[in-house]
Image (cartoon, rainbow, N blue to C red):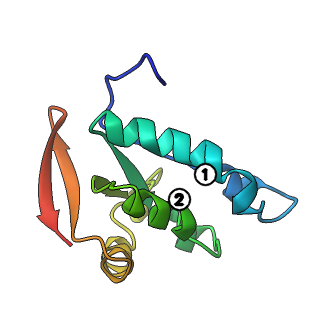
Amino acid sequence: MSRYHNYSVLGHLDLISRYDQQGVYPFEKVKLMVQEILRRVIDDGKGIEVNTSNRRYRLKDLPPAREILKLYREMGGRILTIGSDSHKREHLGACIEENRRELRQMGFETFCTYRGMVSQFHEL
């Protein structure tokens, strides 16, 4: 990741939470590693994807987890996209409005869409 910069947003940051049979891994044990990743993303002028699939998969938290989103915001991260992880037509755009509300409650003000890797900011 330190050499590759041709991306707009980092997606599926904590994908393992969807499949981990052992339960939720304590954030404090990975916080420094996550912080390092987020620092690189922010320094690169890139963003992260917030996924709405938590509702479809009945996860207890957003992907990425609220702790990660809070840390990202505290570190100065502002570039967010919202994706519905649509592998089926009926999932396209699912729960976008719910995630927008949650992100506003967390203190975020905007989200991005992209055209040709150029970000366009929109009010949450």
* Side of 31 where 42 appears, left or right: left
Q: Label 1, secondary structure: give it.
A: loop
- Residue at image point 71% right, 60% down: 28
Which of disc 2 and disc 1 is earlier in sequence? Answer: 1
Residue drawn 60% across and 51% down?
A: 14
Label 1 sits on residue: 14
The secondary element bearing badge 2 is classed as loop
Q: Residue at x 34, y 23 (%)?
A: 5
Classify residue 108 by image quadrant: bottom left
Quadrant position of the C terminus in the picture: bottom left
Other-residue count near label 2 (Cα within 10 Å), few / some / many at <14 / 14–19 / ≥20: many
Q: Position of residue 48 (x, y in %)?
A: 39, 49
- Residue 61 lies, with reference to residue 49, above or below; the image says below
Q: Up-down: is 25 above or below 118?
A: below
Q: Residue furthest right?
A: 22
> Which residue position is annotated with label 2?
64
* Amino acid type assigned to the residue bearing label 2 in the image: Pro
Of the pair 34 and 91, the residue shown nearer to us: 34
**Splitting the image into 4 quarters, where does residue 45 fall?**
top left
> Residue 99: x, y in percent?
38, 74
Q: Is residue 83 above or below residue 98?
A: above
Label 1, residues with CA under 10 Å away: few <14, some 14-19, many ≥20: few
Of residues 97 and 29, which is closer to you in this image?
29
Q: Nearer the viewer, residue 56 or 80?
A: 80
Q: Which numbered dot is residue 1?
A: none
- Res. 67 in view: yes
Q: Tell me where residue 17 appears, x and y as whole percent.
A: 69, 57
Left or right of 119: which side holds 71? right
Report which quarter residue 117 is drawn in: top left
Report if the CB atoms under discs 1 and 2 are less than 8 Å apart.
yes
Q: Position of residue 21 (x, y in %)?
A: 85, 58
Question: In whole angstroms, how far apart are the C-alphas of marks 1 and 2?
Answer: 5 Å
